[in-house]
């Protein structure tokens, strides 16, 4: 077995670090200091630098101008993005592009993927259903009307929807697997109501009232939505890992310099034990993340396992949702009152961590889903 990353994956990490080196977390707009959304748009200059470094086409095939890499490479880059709180729709954009490339019609791929790789066209995905707790594919209905599909329903908390060009919307037809519709933001019958995330970003509630979608813009391949949802979830786990590592690094630096009774507080046993526990959390988040990402790529290549890839994704979510919360809470505790100072970036990380925790959902729900998978697939 070889658990090292490939040369191409390591090169993607180096390119990402070079791009994100100019991003200062304490310069990221603070939700504590800004009423409503922190900004109307994402960080367009950073987006342009990602495009110039060919990172937006990371997971696209060479025929679409991409590098042809995999989910693991995407998660490696997302990990670097979260360390500095990069305000770009990198996860949603790349995951949606992967779905279009793997399952979309040639017409749809030709219309979207070249622009997606260059960054001139922005993609996002609706993955939270009506309330954030129900399956997203059940929140919208799709019915065939001649040469077009008609979409009706609501999707909540769609990231970057106001500034994306196309939105991937899961829907159900009343029979068979869920379908995935690619809807332009300017589509007739599509209304966006502003919502603000815990991290202060501008999200949207989508109301679809008779939205017409061309046949070629709808993906009805079995499992396409499930795959996209798993990539989005695994990518969110990568964001949680990168954020947690950034926070633990800040905490290590602070406790090494902050003195009490003439000694750095990092030398106190109570501080060291708490930091060590959070380090263990991060390593568990890391190993379950790479297992989930590897299974998604292996499943695409035909490799199987005792459980479907959803089982590995559930385990990654269990660790990420609780681990990122524990890391930022311990960081706040060890920083004392300084951690709440709005001139210091830790409160921004805390808000982002809470948003990721809410997106991932409670660990108990993932444990229940994992139990159902174990019951349905007895291990030999």
Image: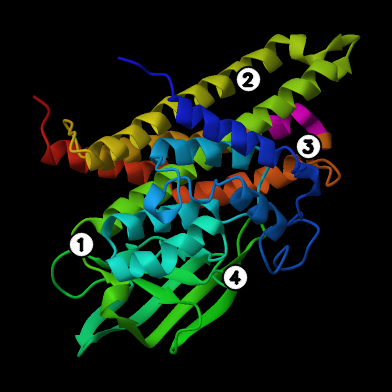
* Among the two numbered marks 4 and 1 on one chain, the one whose residue lies closer to the N terminus: 4
Measuring 80% from the left and 24% from the top, which residue is drawn there? 254
Q: Which stretch is magenta?
A: 330-337
Q: Secondary structure at mark 1?
A: loop
Q: Dot 4 corresponds to which residue?
A: 163
Residue 175 in the image: x percent, y percent?
13, 71
Element assignment for label 3: helix
* Neighbourhood count class around disc 3 (C-alpha, 10 Å): few under 14, some 14–19, many 20 upward: many
- Residue 228: percent from the left, percent from the top? 34, 54
Location of residue 12 with respect to 168 vertically, above or below: above
Left or right: where does residue 156 sit relative to residue 31?
A: left
Q: Reading the chain from its start, which is encountered first: label 4 or label 3?
A: 4
Q: CA distance from mark 2 to mark 1?
A: 47 Å
User: Circle 2 is placed at which residue position?
Assistant: 274
Which comes sooner in the sequence, label 2 or label 1? 1
- The mark nearer the N terminus, 4 or 2, is 4
* Residue at image coords 33%, 33%: 294
Classify the position of the C terminus by image quarter.
top left
Crowding around mark 2 (Cα neighbors within 10 Å: few <14, some 14 to 19, many 20+) is some
């Amino acid at each position: 077995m070889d658990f090292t990353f490939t040369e191409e994956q390591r090169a993607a990490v180096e390119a990402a670090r070079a791009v994100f080196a100019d991003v200062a977390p304490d310069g990221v707009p603070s939700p504590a200091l800004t009423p409503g959304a922190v900004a109307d748009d994402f960080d367009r200059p950073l987006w342009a630098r990602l495009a110039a470094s060919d990172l937006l086409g990371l997971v696209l095939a060479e025929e679409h101008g991409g590098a042809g890499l995999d989910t693991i490479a995407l998660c490696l880059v997302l990990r670097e993005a979260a360390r500095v709180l990069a305000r770009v729709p990198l996860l949603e954009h790349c995951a949606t592009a992967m779905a279009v490339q793997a399952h979309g019609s040639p017409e749809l791929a030709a219309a979207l993927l070249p622009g997606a790789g260059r960054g001139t066209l922005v993609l996002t995905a609706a993955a939270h259903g009506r309330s954030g707790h129900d399956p997203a594919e059940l929140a919208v209905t799709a019915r065939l009307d001649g040469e077009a599909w008609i979409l009706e329903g609501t999707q909540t908390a769609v990231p970057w929807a106001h500034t994306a060009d196309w939105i991937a919307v899961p829907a159900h037809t009343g029979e068979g697997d869920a379908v995935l519709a690619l809807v332009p933001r300017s589509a007739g019958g599509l209304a966006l109501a502003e919502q603000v995330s815990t991290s202060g970003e501008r999200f949207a509630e989508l109301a679809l009232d008779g939205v017409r979608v061309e046949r070629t813009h709808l993906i009805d391949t079995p499992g396409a939505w499930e795959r996209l949802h798993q990539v989005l979830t695994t990518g969110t786990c990568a964001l949680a890992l990168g954020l947690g590592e950034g926070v633990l690094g800040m905490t290590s630096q602070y406790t090494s310099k902050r003195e009490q009774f003439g000694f750095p507080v990092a030398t106190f046993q109570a501080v060291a034990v708490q930091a060590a526990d959070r380090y263990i959390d991060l390593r568990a988040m890391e190993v379950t993340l790479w297992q989930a990402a590897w299974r998604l790529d292996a499943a695409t290549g035909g490799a199987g396992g005792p459980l479907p890839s959803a089982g590995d994704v559930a385990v990654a979510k269990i660790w990420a949702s609780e681990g990122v919360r524990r890391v930022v809470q311990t960081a706040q505790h060890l920083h004392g009152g300084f951690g709440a100072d709005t001139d210091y970036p830790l409160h921004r990380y805390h808000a982002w961590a809470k948003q990721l925790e809410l997106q991932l959902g409670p660990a108990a729900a993932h444990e229940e889903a994992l139990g159902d998978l174990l019951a349905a697939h007895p291990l030999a």
